[in-house]
């Protein structure tokens, strides 16, 4: 068991965020809740000053240590309602060795966090939502992963059916293969903005399209399609098996120099899709509101920006640039824009065009010579080998600063600020950045 202390001179408790659970220093050090207090104290000091201080994890015999039993969390009681803050939600517990408890420090908000309030059926009510977070591992006993208590990690919590893993709470369960240790130069807030968008990007490119993610540092190329094909088929969740095992043919994969078009090129997922694709040698065309995003995106050296305001014109421009031979496209917006993208693709039954939809596929069935794909997100949490490979590649990319991270707007103040931030997203007021709520 670990007690976490600082060796730095950071001693500014006045600047600390709220103390939770509330208790006096004397009480906590003398009492049997020694560790929660010390952990909390460190976490307060940690947050973004972690970079200035060094954290030491000291193994210590802390007999009598008691985990707090309850925490703050946001609960959804019914559809179309705001999330309600409670101070007395049970802290989730781990059930297997490959699970850990993470003290959530920052929550990254995703479109699904406000959309799910409107129309998704929840596995149970009240429901705890939230898909992206970063924080400190406070309980983890396994040694298989090289992770340990005190590590700062990001977690993409794609398993929405398991509320223990949700982000809108102070302590969350995370699977060892769904977390990535953050290097010192990536802030906790930035870390919280990466997970789901990166995983969706990597699975869309790697599994649906078969793109090999290039080797970074000591790591090998990441060939997710091959990784999936070498699994026993029954270990792939049944509802995504067909998507994962569509083809193994080499000529169905994108190759360096070929085009990839991303409609909704200003989204966070598109930021990752485009960078991974470019690292692998593809030429990327982004369809965006150029008046709004052109200045920012053109400094990143994209091959082409196509304005999205007139969709028919955008289709013509894309056909012109690609000479009518486009084979790979990803939509991050919705069925109408996905349908436009399908019109940009080459229709050829021998070398078909491939369209991946992150939000929704076109309403009309695919034409001959065009294959539709949906992202098999489940692979990430249900197939440990896939999750681990994705997190290992990300860790290398972050360590090497090989990918640019989303711009974040940090909201300090805790869970009670989540509803307001989601309303802003719903109203379309958040553009080209992620909102991150710090606890
Ligand atoms: N299948 C999955 O598991 C999965 C995983 C990740 C994401 N998703 C889905 O993928 C979508 C994108 O997610 P995200 O987190 O990347 O979104 P995001 O960062 O919130 O960005 C959404 C972007 O879409 C752009 N957009 C909206 N309408 C557009 C149009 N007609 N043409 C061009 N761009 C348009 C917006 O641009 P403006 O700022 O110009 O309005 C905005 O930048 C969401 O629907 C999300 O739910 C699904």
Image: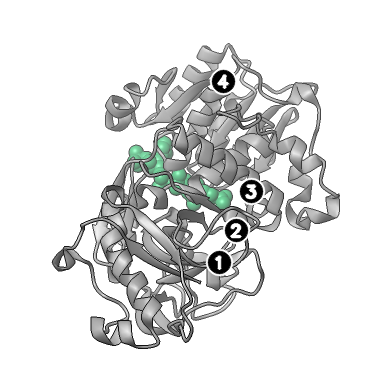
CB of mark 3 within 8 Å of CB of mark 4? no
Q: CA distance from mark 1 to mark 3?
A: 17 Å
* Badge nearest the viewer, 3 or 4: 3
Q: Viewer-nearest of labels 1 and 2?
A: 1
Residues at circles 1 and 2 in contact by the CB criterion of under 8 Å: yes
Q: Residue at x 53, y 24 (%)?
A: 279
What element does badge 4 sit on? loop
Residue 22 placed where, x, y %?
Answer: 27, 82
Residue contact between numbered discs 1 and 3, judged by CB atoms under 8 Å: no
Is 114 or 225 nearer to us in this picture?
225
Real-space CA distance between mark 2 and mark 3, rounded to the nearest whole angstrom: 8 Å
Q: Nearer the viewer, mark 1 or mark 3?
A: 1
C-alpha distance separating marks 1 and 2: 9 Å
| SS type, badge 3 | helix
How many marks do you count on the picture?
Answer: 4
Instruction: Name the outermost residue toward the left.
Output: 14
Mark 2 vs 3, N-terminal side: 2
Of marks 1 and 4, the one in the foreground: 1
Label 3 sits on residue: 388
């Amino acid at each position: 068991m670990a007690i976490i202390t600082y060796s730095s001179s950071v001693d500014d408790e006045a600047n600390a965020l709220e103390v939770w659970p509330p208790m006096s220093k004397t009480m906590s050090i003398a009492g049997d809740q020694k560790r929660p207090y010390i952990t909390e104290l460190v976490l307060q000091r940690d947050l973004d000053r972690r970079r200035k201080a060094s954290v030491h994890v000291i193994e210590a015999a802390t007999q009598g240590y008691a985990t707090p039993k309850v925490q703050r969390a946001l609960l959804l009681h019914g559809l179309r309602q705001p999330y309600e803050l409670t101070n007395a939600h049970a802290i989730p517990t781990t059930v297997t060795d490959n699970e850990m408890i993470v003290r959530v420090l920052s929550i990254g908000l995703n479109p699904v966090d406000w959309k799910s309030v409107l129309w998704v059926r929840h596995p149970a009510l009240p429901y705890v939502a939230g898909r992206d977070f970063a924080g400190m591992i406070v309980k983890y006993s396994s040694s298989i992963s090289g992770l340990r208590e005190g590590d700062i990690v990001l977690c993409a919590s794609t398993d929405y059916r398991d509320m223990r893993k949700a982000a809108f709470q102070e302590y969350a369960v995370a699977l060892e293969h769904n977390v990535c240790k953050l290097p010192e130069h990536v802030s906790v807030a930035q870390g919280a903005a990466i997970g789901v968008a990166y995983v969706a990007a990597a699975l869309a490119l790697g599994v649906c399209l078969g793109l090999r993610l290039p080797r970074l540092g000591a790591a090998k190329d990441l060939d997710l399609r091959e990784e999936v094909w070498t699994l026993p088929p029954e270990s792939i969740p049944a509802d995504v098996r067909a998507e994962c095992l569509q083809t193994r043919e080499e000529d169905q994969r994108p190759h360096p120099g070929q085009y990839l078009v991303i409609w909704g090129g200003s989204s966070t997922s598109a930021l990752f899709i485009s960078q991974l694709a470019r690292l692998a040698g593809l030429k990327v065309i982004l369809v965006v509101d150029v008046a709004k995003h052109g200045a920012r995106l053109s400094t990143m050296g994209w091959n082409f920006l196509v304005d999205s305001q007139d969709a028919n014109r955008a289709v013509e421009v894309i056909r012109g640039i690609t000479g009518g031979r486009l084979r790979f496209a990803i939509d991050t917006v919705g069925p109408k824009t996905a349908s436009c993208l399908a019109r940009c693709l080459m229709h050829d039954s021998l070398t078909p065009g491939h369209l991946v939809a992150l939000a929704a596929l076109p309403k009309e069935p695919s034409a001959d010579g065009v294959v539709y794909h949906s992202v098999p997100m489940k692979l990430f949490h249900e197939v440990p080998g896939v999750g681990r490979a994705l997190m290992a590649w990300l860790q290398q990319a972050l360590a090497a600063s090989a990918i640019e991270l989303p711009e974040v707007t940090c909201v300090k103040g805790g869970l009670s600020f989540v509803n307001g931030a989601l309303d802003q997203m719903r109203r379309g007021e958040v553009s080209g950045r992620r909102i991150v709520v710090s606890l």
